[in-house]
Amino acid sequence: MHTLQQAVLAKKAALAEVVAQPLDRLAEQCAAHWPDPNALDRAMQEAIGAISNCRTLYAWDRKNRVISSLIQPAEADTGWRGADLSQRPYLKNNLPFKGIMLSSVYQSMHTHEQCVTALHAVNRDGHLLGFIAADFALGDLLMDAQLSPQHLHWQQFRGDPAVRSTLFMQERVQSKMDDHIDQALQSIECLVAEHGIFHVKIHFSSGRCSFWLLKDPYNYRIHTPEEIVNPDLCLFYPMHAYPAAAQVRPAQIPRILDEFKALRYADETVYLRSGSLNIMNGMVGLTFSCDGSHYMPADEFLEKNLSFWIGELAAGQQ
């Protein structure tokens, strides 16, 4: 199972592996010259070319004062000597007394880009002298990176406490979508199965529907209930073969929509306000009158029965 945290840690570990040895060598050289700023500059100027994608190198003492220049591949900016680094984000964490540590992503004061800093302690005879830092622009590190796969699983999010606290003072009000729900869901099924709509969100309570298309994924279309039930709506969307990469099978679409309808009418107090389906990643989204939201794979959603949801939602109010 790959979580977001695990994916981030893996990328940090890969960067640490690349920079560890050159920074180890540089730390030993800096320890021999500490705190001579000119000697530190020369050591870092020689080292920066061997550290892949490194934008800047610099050294600072235990009082968080820069004692070297800001070393870049083509120049050394002496104006940074004496600068106070105490407000740098990475100094708010515990710094390493040995070896290397990678910062979280932050905005560089120098370039205003998102960056990551590799920090390495400088020691001599067992005493901590200070630190050296290597800055890396996120744009350089991720230039050839691949998007990490997302592990899809059931996630539940509680909504606005104010809505939950007044839940039993409200009841479902018939919407325009409810008035023609069978016809609307039949139309939606056809559009998803045959007209290239890969993501649909049905707002039952407010009476509207949003579509995302395979041929135009950066824009979405919003339709009223009257438009959804109009049999000529299919003329608006060109025919499109069902995508082979879809995680939801065509036969599952009407079953999912039928479950949406059942949850809409399951209870007059606890009911479905909106439901979404993405056939490409196979995820179903549900938002209920208690303002709680659920996201789960379509296969898992279809395994649940109505009694599960009524019990789950009732338990969520306690």
Image: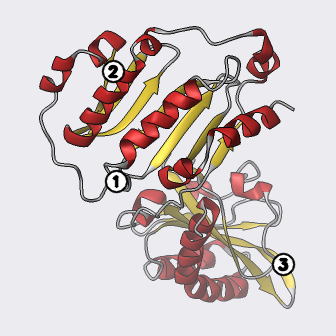
* Quadrant in the picture for residue 140: bottom left
Q: Residue at x 42, y 63 (%)?
A: 142
- Identified by mark 3, the residue type is Leu
- Residue 218 visible in this rendered orientation of the protein: no
Image coordinates for residue 161, horizontal then vertical, percent: 78, 24
**Disc nearer the start of the sequence (2/1):** 2
Distance (Cα) linking label 1 and label 3: 62 Å
* Quadrant in the picture for residue 131: bottom right
- Identified by mark 1, the residue type is Arg
Image coordinates for residue 254, horizontal then vertical, percent: 38, 39
Mark 3 highlights which residue? Answer: 128
Distance (Cα) linking label 3 and label 2: 74 Å
Mark 2 highlights which residue? Answer: 183
- Identified by mark 2, the residue type is Gln
**Disc nearer the start of the sequence (1/3):** 3
Badge 2: few (under 14), some or many (20 or more) residues near its Cα, within 10 Å?
Answer: some
Q: Secondary structure at mark 3?
A: strand
Quadrant location, the N terminus: bottom right
Badge 3: few (under 14), some or many (20 or more) residues near its Cα, within 10 Å?
Answer: some
Q: Which mark is residue 249?
A: 1
Contact (Cβ within 8 Å) of mark 3 with mark 2: no
- Residue 266 visible in this rendered orientation of the protein: yes
Badge 1: few (under 14), some or many (20 or more) residues near its Cα, within 10 Å?
Answer: some
Q: Is residue 286 toward the left or the right of residue 193 in the image?
A: right
